[in-house]
Image (cartoon, coloured by chain):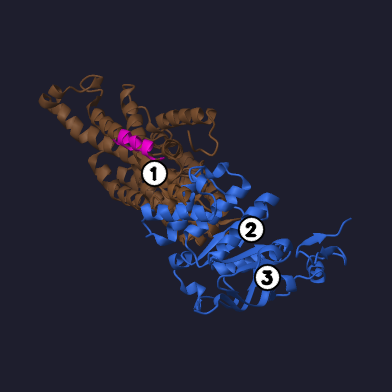
Chain colours: A blue, B brown
């Protein structure tokens, strides 16, 4: 078993009629790590995530999952290997949390199938792993933002994926919910789940990531250990801040704006 | 650990919903049996068993008039309710109905065209209505593919509006050219909907398309849930959202265009019945699609019973479904439609 689960090889991507987002993206996601894709808004983090999902296809280069081209997997095969927690999700109808998490069983079912007792057990286990077993009977349209995020994680876990992708999972959460989310993700990583998530928040990268992928708009990415990669100067340049705007406390690797 | 184990166990939250199925199925069965005896011959009200045994005309009436009509009304309600559920899921919107992608207007245009230019034979009206209903969907779909604005669903809605408008303009032209004494009333009556002239032949003609559509939708009933999710999400769950939506849309429109080709424009069933089903058994289409099919069948039969019973002359079916449907809709709205879900 190679250490690399998902690899981008010389990947280029541009939206139709848009400027190129990536020109030569090379990156390997290591098995069992929690990796954070960091960069400012609109720089291409979600594009990278969607290419990992197989939803967007590179205009050049290849994306491989376990040494096999993503587009060579059938839809159901890919659904059993890669799952997504989207940033926001429209919920048109009022499902119970359990019904909603059961959607994650879809790639394990036949086209005309429906989830059975084994799937319900898997869904309840996913709820336990996401830390919200007590919400099974609640309605998805009546949850708080933090709970909603955890339900989406539970649904993604019910897919029993090799890679869990999360798109800006902390974007709309308050400090407490952000903390609990990071705790949950870090527990999942301890259990051996490989996680790739995007964020625009360097603190998240510093707090939880084993490895950080910096997307800076150059068309490629820089990868490294967060504490080494994320220096005040580099981040100031990335987020277009004046020199001295950021401080990193050496005693405790966290990042703050300077006191005004 | 104990906590976890108990939380993993299934909770009996759905048991109280079992009676809903038994009740719905029995009520529909009872309704069907009663409807066979209900009518205006030989007296207004129920036919007595003794009459059915002795009166040959009554036997012929039941077998050749009431039965095919009853079964078509049942099929009509089932098809429109199932198709309505499909459309409300695909468009993630509780306010759409199966005719809105150019299907209803297309059918009306086709029927009018047949009435004015093709001698108005029943077969021609039926065939043209079905063909143009499907053409409406096809046009909307192709137009949506060529448009360059907004999301896929928005493009479909816009294309549907445009195609409906084109067909309704076409319908206007045909009406303008129609003979005002002979053809215009016929167009008007077709558009009001009704099963008055229904025969076994018509029933058998539309049955295969209706059953094929219904069977496909029924088999897909759990997976329909996925089609209401965002496209990216549905994709991440291993679905092929565009392809699956197209297949479901074709199944729904196939059945719908077949049934409206014999029944004319019958509104509101496809909009209101899925709502009621959702309220009764929840948002999961695995349960609410079968509920919608049973309820829709019952609603179709009740409306048609009223259409043939209330007055000596026939009341157009479309008027009754609109009246009852809108009435129920207003009551639901007043009690808080919300997202159209729980009671």
Q: Is residue B136 visible?
A: no
| Badge 3: chain ID | A
**Side of B11 relative to A242 (left or right):** left
For the point 44% across and 28% down, the residue is B323
| Pointer 2 with pointer 1, Cβ within 8 A | no
For the point 37% across and 50% down, the residue is B217
Which residue in the protein does label 2 denote? A182
For the point 68% across and 68% down, the residue is A18
Q: Earlier in the sequence, mark 2 or mark 3?
A: 2
| Badge 1: chain ID | B
| Pointer 1 with pointer 3, Cβ within 8 A | no
**Side of A219 relative to B306 (left or right):** right
Q: Foreground residue, B292 or A37? A: A37
Q: Which residues are magenta?
A: B13-25
Which of the labelled discs sits on residue A212, or is there none?
A: 3
How many numbered dots are placed on residues in this image?
3
Q: Residue furthest left?
A: B54
Vertical side of B214 occupied by A242: above or below: below
Which residue in the protein does label 1 denote? B287
> Residue B219's spot in the image, x, y percent?
35, 52
User: Separation of disc 1 and disc 3 at Cα?
Assistant: 45 Å
| Pointer 2 with pointer 3, Cβ within 8 A | no
| Badge 2: chain ID | A
Badge 3 marks a residue whose secondary structure is: strand
For label 3, count other residues whose C-alpha is less than 10 Å away and answer few (under 14), some (14-19) or many (20+): many
Question: Do marks 2 and 1 both belong to one polypeptide chain?
Answer: no
* Quarter of the rendering containing residue B36: top left
């Amino acid at each position: 078993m190679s250490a690399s689960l998902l690899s981008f090889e010389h990947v280029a991507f541009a939206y139709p009629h848009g400027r190129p987002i990536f020109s030569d993206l090379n990156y390997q996601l290591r098995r069992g790590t929690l990796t954070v894709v960091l960069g400012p808004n609109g720089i291409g983090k979600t594009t990278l995530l969607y290419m990992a999902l197989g939803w967007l296809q590179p205009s050049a280069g290849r994306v491989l999952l376990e040494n096999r081209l993503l587009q060579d997997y059938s839809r159901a095969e890919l659904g059993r290997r890669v799952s997504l927690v989207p940033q926001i999700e429209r919920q048109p109808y009022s499902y119970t949390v359990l019904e909603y998490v059961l959607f994650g069983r879809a790639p394990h079912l036949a086209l005309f199938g429906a989830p059975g007792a084994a799937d319900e057990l898997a869904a309840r286990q996913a709820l336990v792993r996401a830390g919200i077993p007590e919400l099974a009977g609640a309605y998805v349209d009546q949850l708080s933002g933090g709970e909603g995020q955890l339900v989406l994680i539970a649904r993604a876990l019910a897919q029993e994926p090799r890679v869990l992708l999360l798109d800006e999972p902390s974007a709309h959460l308050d400090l407490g919910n952000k903390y609990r989310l990071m705790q949950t993700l870090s527990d999942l990583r301890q259990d051996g789940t490989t996680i790739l998530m995007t964020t625009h928040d360097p603190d998240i990268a510093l707090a939880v990531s084993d490895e950080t992928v910096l997307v800076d708009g150059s068309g490629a990415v820089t990868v490294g250990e967060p504490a080494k990669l994320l220096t005040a100067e580099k981040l100031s340049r990335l987020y277009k801040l004046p020199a001295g705007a950021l401080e990193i406390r050496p005693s405790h690797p966290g990042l703050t704006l300077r006191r005004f | 650990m104990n906590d976890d184990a108990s939380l993993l166990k299934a909770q009996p939250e759905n048991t109280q919903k079992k009676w809903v199925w038994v009740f719905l199925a029995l009520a529909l069965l009872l309704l069907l049996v009663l409807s066979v005896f209900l009518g205006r011959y030989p007296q207004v009200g129920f036919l007595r068993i003794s009459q059915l045994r002795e009166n040959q005309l009554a036997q012929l009436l039941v077998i050749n008039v009431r039965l095919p009509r009853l079964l078509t009304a049942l099929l009509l309600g089932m098809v429109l309710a199932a198709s309505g559920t499909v459309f409300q899921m695909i468009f993630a919107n509780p306010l759409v109905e199966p005719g809105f992608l150019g299907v209803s207007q297309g059918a009306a245009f086709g029927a009018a065209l047949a009435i004015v230019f093709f001698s108005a034979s029943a077969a021609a009206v039926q065939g043209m209505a079905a063909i143009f209903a499907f053409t409406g969907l096809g046009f909307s779909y192709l137009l949506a593919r060529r448009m360059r604005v907004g999301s896929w669903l928005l493009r479909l809605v816009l294309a549907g509006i445009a195609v409906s408008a084109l067909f309704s303009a076409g319908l206007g032209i045909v009406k303008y050219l129609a003979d005002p004494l002979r053809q215009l009333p016929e167009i008007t009556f077709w558009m009001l909907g009704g099963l008055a002239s229904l025969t076994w032949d018509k029933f058998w003609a539309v049955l295969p398309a209706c059953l094929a559509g219904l069977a496909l939708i029924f088999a897909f009933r759990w997976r329909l849930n996925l089609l209401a999710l965002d496209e990216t999400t549905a994709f991440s769950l291993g679905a092929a959202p565009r392809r699956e939506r197209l297949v479901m849309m074709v199944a729904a429109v196939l059945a719908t265009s077949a049934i409206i080709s014999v029944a004319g424009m019958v509104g509101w069933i496809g909009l209101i019945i899925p709502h009621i089903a959702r309220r009764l058994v929840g948002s999961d289409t695995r349960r609410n699609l079968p509920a919608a099919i049973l309820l829709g069948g019952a609603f179709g039969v009740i409306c048609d019973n009223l259409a043939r019973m209330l007055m000596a002359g026939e009341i157009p079916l479309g008027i009754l479904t609109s009246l009852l449907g809108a009435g129920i809709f207003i009551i639901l709205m007043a009690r808080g439609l919300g997202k159209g879900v729980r009671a």
